[in-house]
Amino acid sequence: MLLGGLLGALVIPALSDRQHKRKRYLLLGVVLAIPGLVGVTFAGSFALLLACAFAFGFFLTSLSPVGMQYAAEITQPTPEGTSNGVIQLFAQASVVFVYIMEAMKAPDGAFTPSLLLAVGLLLVSALLITQLEEPKL
């Protein structure tokens, strides 16, 4: 997941910057991260788990810089540091999901229910992204 995320963070934001498109890459990343997360949830072999974790990291981690750039572009003339700082502040609320994962843990210790919740949240995110406007440059 980490290696995929590192590579994705190099590739996806560069493509987004080259085309000056943010919404397209945000939607693409979220939609393509979903099969990776489903694979991580249900992988039957270690090789499949690694491949799915790589894909999940590649597509989801790469969205952070694209999202930050999108936020900076739509909040102009607000300083970029301010808009990114507010996003980082709200991102810290994701720790709540860790507590939800623990609470939803199956009796056998599996995190399958919470990972399926994460898939559902990614689907909701994809729907919300379709409602975004592309920033005007």
Image (cartoon, rainbow, N blue to C red):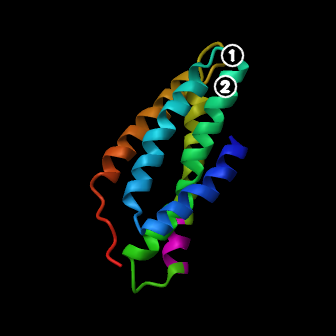
**Above or below — where is 64 with respect to 110?**
below
Q: Quadrant of the C terminus?
A: bottom left
* Picture disc at residue 45: 1
Crowding at mark 1 (Cα within 10 Å: few <14, some 14-19, many 20+): few
Instruction: Find residue 121 and report its horizontal and vertical position in percent.
Output: 42, 39
**Residue at (64% x, 58% y) in the render:** 10
Q: Depth check: 71 or 87 in front? A: 71
Q: Main secondary structure of the magenta part?
A: helix
**Above or below — where is 107 with respect to 9?**
above
Q: Are marks 2 and 1 in contact (CB under 8 Å)?
A: yes
**Residue at (46% x, 75% y) in the render:** 72
Q: CA distance from mark 2 to mark 1?
A: 6 Å
Quadrant in which residue 70 is drawn: bottom left
Quadrant in which residue 122 is drawn: top left
Q: Depth check: 115 or 132 in front? A: 132
Label 2 secondary element:
helix
On the image, numbered disc 2 is attached to which residue?
49
Left or right of 132: which side holds 70? right
Instruction: Find residue 89 and report its horizontal and vertical position in percent.
Output: 55, 65
In the image, the segment drawn in magenta is: 81-87
**Above or below — where is 114 with respect to 93?**
above
Say what amino acid the circle numbered 2 marks.
Answer: Leu
Numbered marks: total: 2
**Above or below — where is 18 with respect to 129?**
below
